[in-house]
Each structure stands twice: as structure tokens, then as C-alpha cells.
Amino acid sequence: MDSVTQAALGSAVGGAVLGRRLGWRAFAWGAGLGTLPDLDVLLSYGGPVADFVFHRGASHAIAVHTLAAPLLGAVAWRLHRARGVGLAQWVLAVWLVLVTHALLDAVTIYGTRLLLPFADEAVGLGSLFIIDPLYTLPLLVGIAAALAGRVGLRARRWNLTGLALSTLYVGWSIVAQQHVLNVAEAALAERGIEPEHVLVTPAPFSTVLWRIVAMTAPGDDYYEGYYTVGSGREPHLTRFPSRPELLRPLAATPAVRRLRAFTDGYYAVGLQGDSVVITDLRMGAAPAYAFAFAVGQREDGTIVPMPDVAATAPRPPLDRILGEMLACARGRPVALIAC
């Protein structure tokens, strides 16, 4: 999730565990620790694809949090020993702030390696968009009310209420996602399409409008569309081509292997000029996907490896994309996106 949301979640968790004795300091510590795992974005892993794949790696692993919590907790305990908070309570607070950060990230689609070093699989449920005000606002209101009430008992209840509402919203997003998946699979079956796998993720800032991506078994095309919960309308799915055969000479390269695994098979392949480009279909939408990488080059009719680079393509203005998504949610035909 975005940094504001992670700081708010960390602040709310810190306040819930330590607020009675530490007051506003508990919220401040929680906010700071809540953004700590995302500092891995400052690290370089050796190239654009590696940086993309290994973000949310060890810094988001529960095992690492379990090792780090006693160290960070001991530092905080020494700084605030006079406040009467025990070391064990500090360690618990730090651990909860770090772990809830990782668990919230795992609800988005990007991919979070929660189980390192025991398992390398990235978890990405994909039921929440990376920025969702309906998740964040209850946290912020609860924190503000608690601080305005000088973190008294009644004020702390506001903070707990904000946490509860945000958690219930995550639960709703999972239920809605499963409903849309069922609708999508039924619509595909009605059209005689037998996809290899189907992805359902929320549109920006929403758990009402959902995006559907269906990958065909050969991988030479995929379907994309939108569905609005409660609309009663079937999703309209648009077919897009892909050229997986371009990857055959590149299959053994680290960049291609990493992208295939990290995208969980939701990728498209094409040419931009003479560059072979892999596009991650999980984030963004046609034609404005968030991540794409050039991994090979066409030379004299032959595909050869090249150092991976981030690929850019002309993108429509964001306000136009969001406007057409809103029109799509209302059932109106649009020109830009597949709804």
C-alpha cells in the first residue's frame, strides 16, 4: 500500500498497544515503524527487473520481523524506560506494526514474500488497490480522534474503531473479489472461452469496479474487461494479442525467468521497435500498464538477449483513464479501456 496508509496503520497499531502509557509517542513510533519495510525501495538489486521482483522481499518477511522486533523494541524501551512500558510490550508492538505492514501489502496484487527464507513465493491476493481511501480514512479519523482526546480511554476507543472498520473493509474486498471471479468465469464459459487462469483486481480507489484478466492456455492472447458489483450486467471482455514465441530464445535469461515467475503467468509479450517487451498485466490496464521491461533485441531476424531495461510507451492522461473507468462502471461504452 501507499506510504500514508502504511504510516496510518502502523500508528493505529502502535497506539492500540502502547497508547495508554505512551500517549502520542505510541502513535508516532507506530507511524515511523510502519513505513520502515518500504525503505527497501532505496536498495539496488542489480537491474530494473531485479529491483522490480525483489521489492517487498526480505524487508517484508515475517521471519525477519521476528528477528528485528527484539532489537528495535530494546532501543525504544531504553529511550522510554521511564514511561513504564516493559520490554516485552515494546517487542510485541514493534512486531505487530511490522507484520501488519507486510500482511496489508500481501492483500494487494504486487507480490510480497511473507515466508522468506522458508518459501520464495510472493503472496499477492489482489483484493485491494494500492491506494484506497476507504481503507485509509477510518484509520486517520480514529488516530485524529484519539490524539484530540489526549489518548484517554474513550479516545483510544476511536482508534480501535478505525482499526476494526478498516479490517472489515479488507474482509469485504475479499468477498467482493470472489463474487466477481465467479461472474467472470461464468461469462467466459458462456462465450466458450476456456482460460488457463483468471485474475480479478479492483480498479483504482474502489472495491465496486473490478478489472478482469483471463489468460488463454496457449498464451497467444488474453481477455480484459471490467465488472461493477451490483450492476446486473455481464462483463464485456476484449481480446488482446500476445506473442510468447518471442521469448523462446530468451527463456533461460534471468530477467525472463524472474518475470514469468513473479507475474504468476499474467504477462504479455510484444515488440516495441526491435525490442522484445514483457508487460505485467496485473497492474494498470490496457493500454496503460504500470510495468513493462525490454528483455531482448531483434537483430537480423534473430532474437538475442540484452540487458533488461524498463520499457515505456505513450500513455493516455490519467484523468482520461479514470474518467473512462467511471463511465465503464455506469455501463456506458468508452473508447480507451476494455470494459
Image (cartoon, rainbow, N blue to C red):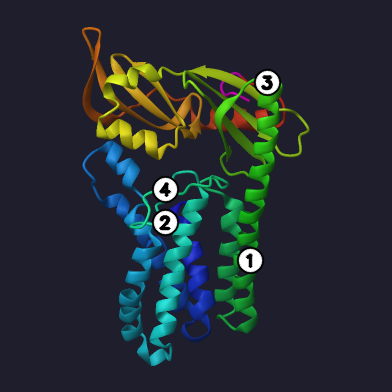
Secondary structure under tag 1 reads helix
Pointer 1 or 4: first along the chain: 4
In the image, 288 versus 252, the foreground residue is: 252
Q: Residues within 10 Å of mark 4 (few under 14, many from 20)?
A: many
> What is the number of the mark on residue 164?
1
Residue name at image x 33 percent, y 70 percent: 67
Viewer-side residue, 162 vs 106: 106
**Nearer the N terminus, badge 2 or badge 3?**
2
Residue 36 in which image quadrant: bottom left
Q: CA distance from mark 1 to mark 4?
A: 26 Å
- The circle drawn on residue 122 is 4
Q: Is residue 273 left or right of residue 300?
A: right
Residue at x 37%, y 64% (from the top left corner)? 63
Q: The residue tagged with tag 4: helix, strand or loop?
A: loop
| Residue indicated by mark 3 | 333
Q: Return the x and y of residue 27 as percentages of the image width and height.
A: 47, 73
| Residue 278, x across and y down, in percent | 37, 26
Indicate the amino acid at tag 4.
Answer: Ala
Pointer 1 local density, CA inside 10 Å: few below 14, some 14–19, many at least 20:
few
Reading the image, the residue beneath label 2 is 114
Between the C-alphas of marks 2 and 1, the distance is: 23 Å
- Secondary element under disc 2, as helix, strand or loop, is loop
Query: What is the magenta range?
Result: 335-339
Q: Amino acid at mark 3?
A: Pro
Residue at mark 3 to residue at mark 4: CA–CA distance:
36 Å
Q: Nearer the viewer, residue 319 or 58?
A: 58
Residue 197 image point, x, y percent: 55, 32
| Mark 2 vs 1, N-terminal side | 2
Mark in front: 2 vs 1: 2
